[in-house]
């Protein structure tokens, strides 16, 4: 009789914006499948990342940060979180320990309602207390850990640093043991369910997020409109449109003498080359589309809203 049984299950990464959910997913996979920026509300929909080995298949769902709902885009973002939770075999809240050590009141604001909503949930729950690299004196975590144990009595609480990959192999071992028994649901070499087209659009959006200030990043969306293999040059030719909500934002994306858009293009192209492992010609256009964040059909086209 075989002593090891294969395990497979869905794991929902969820929590407040900027906690490091996407960083954690990329670190667990050892590969980038989801974009990361220092700005909150970077992730806009469910992104699936798959980790397979000889003993298990862990299907992670990265989700948008849980935040107050303002308008249709943020409503669809929150829906993506609850839909992911519905699919999950294991729930993995991720939080920023450094923030909550300094501001325990934010912990109450951000996590208490979630803990309450999941209080009678019987699924395994692993709370990742992230960003522990940001303070040397680990005893500073004690009040936070105590409060988390009160808030989530049935959960396992796990301090880690997604950035430094600290604690992640132990986290994977623990997670594996909590997954249901069952066969793999995806081919062993599949790392995500996202299309390359979507990943390319996300890479461009990441660079926009990194360069734009204030509210402008939240007004941008990226759509890959054209994708062709050019046999003559051996290049993949990609045309992507950057949508902005206001004419003024268009000027800000383009920058002085086009310097802004040029830099975004250069940075994005470099990463797309790595993703596609080949030559890439990337063209970016900026178009104004007022009120796109409220346009359900457009959000659907972008893949942000379920059909
Ligand atoms: N110091 C430190 N920074 C981290 C860690 N994990 C993530 N970060 C940083 O935190 C910021 C937010 O990371 P993300 O992974 O985008 O956070 P998120 O939870 O996915 O955020 P949203 O998608 O906006 O909800 C980035 O600047 C990361 O580099 C960590 O363990 N330590
Ligand atoms: Mg994210």
Image (spheres, grey):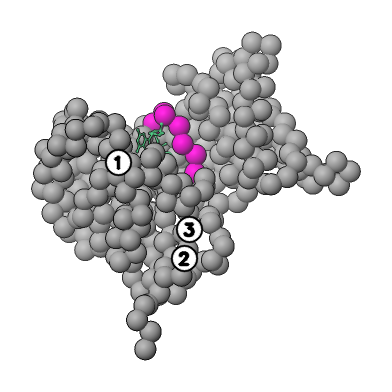
Q: Nearer the viewer, mark 2 or mark 3?
A: 2
Q: Nearer the viewer, residue 291 or 165?
A: 165
- Say what secondary structure mark 3 lies in: strand
In the rendered image of this protein, does residue 54 appear above or below residue 136?
Answer: below
Within the image, what quadrant is residue 111 found in? Answer: top left
What residue sits right under mark 1 in the picture?
A: 130
Looking at the image, the residue that sits furthest to the front is 136
In percent of width and height, residue 130 lies at 30, 41
In percent of width and height, residue 268 lies at 62, 33
Q: Earlier in the sequence, mark 1 or mark 2?
A: 2
Please say whether residue 94 is one of the residues in the magenta stretch: no
Q: CA distance from mark 3 to mark 1?
A: 21 Å
Magenta-tinted stretch: 34-40
Image quadrant for the N terminus?
bottom left
Q: Nearer the viewer, mark 3 or mark 1?
A: 1
- In the rendered structure, the answer to whether residue 221 lies left or right of residue 56 reads right
What residue sits right under mark 3 in the picture?
A: 50
Q: Which mark is residue 291?
A: none
Looking at the image, the residue that sits furthest to the bottom is 1
- In the rendered structure, the answer to whether residue 99 lies left or right of residue 72 reads left
What residue sits right under mark 2 in the picture?
A: 53
- Residue drawn at point x = 49 percent, y = 33 percent: 293
- Say what secondary structure mark 1 lies in: strand
- Say what secondary structure mark 2 lies in: loop
- Residue drawn at point x = 42 percent, y = 43 percent: 22
Q: Nearer the viewer, residue 168 or 64?
A: 168
Kindly indicate whether the residue at mark 1 contacts the one at mark 3 (C-beta within 8 angstroms): no
Is the residue indicated by label 1 positioned so its CB lies within 8 Å of ligand 1?
yes
């Amino acid at each position: 009789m075989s002593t090891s049984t294969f395990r497979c299950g869905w794991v929902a990464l969820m929590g407040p914006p900027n906690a490091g959910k996407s960083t954690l997913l990329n670190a667990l996979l050892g590969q980038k499948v989801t974009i990361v920026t220092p700005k909150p509300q970077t992730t806009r929909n469910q992104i699936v990342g798959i980790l397979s080995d000889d003993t298990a298949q862990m299907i992670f769902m990265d989700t948008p940060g849980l935040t107050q709902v303002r308008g249709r885009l943020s409503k669809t973002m929150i829906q993506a979180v609850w839909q992911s939770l519905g699919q999950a075999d294991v729930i993995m809240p991720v939080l920023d320990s450094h923030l909550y050590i300094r501001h325990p009141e934010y912990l109450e604001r951000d996590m208490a309602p979630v803990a309450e909503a999941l209080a009678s949930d019987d699924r395994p729950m692993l709370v990742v207390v992230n960003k522990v690299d940001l303070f040397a004196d680990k005893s500073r975590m004690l009040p936070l850990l105590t409060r988390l144990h009160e808030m989530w009595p049935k959960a396992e609480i796990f301090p880690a640093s997604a950035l430094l990959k600290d604690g992640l192999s132990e986290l994977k071992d623990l997670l594996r043991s909590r997954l249901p028994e069952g066969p793999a649901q995806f081919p062993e070499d599949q790392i995500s369910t996202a299309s390359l087209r979507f990943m390319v659009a996300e890479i461009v959006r990441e660079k926009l997020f990194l360069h734009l200030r204030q509210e402008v990043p939240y007004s941008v969306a990226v759509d890959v409109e054209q994708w062709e293999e050019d046999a003559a040059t051996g290049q993949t030719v990609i045309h992507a449109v950057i949508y902005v909500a206001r004419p003024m934002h268009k000027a800000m994306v383009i920058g002085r003498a086009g310097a802004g858009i040029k830099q975004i293009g250069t940075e994005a192209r470099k990463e797309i080359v790595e993703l596609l492992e080949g030559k890439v010609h990337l063209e970016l256009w900026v178009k104004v589309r007022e009120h796109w964040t409220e346009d359900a059909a457009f959000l659907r086209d972008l893949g942000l809203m379920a059909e």
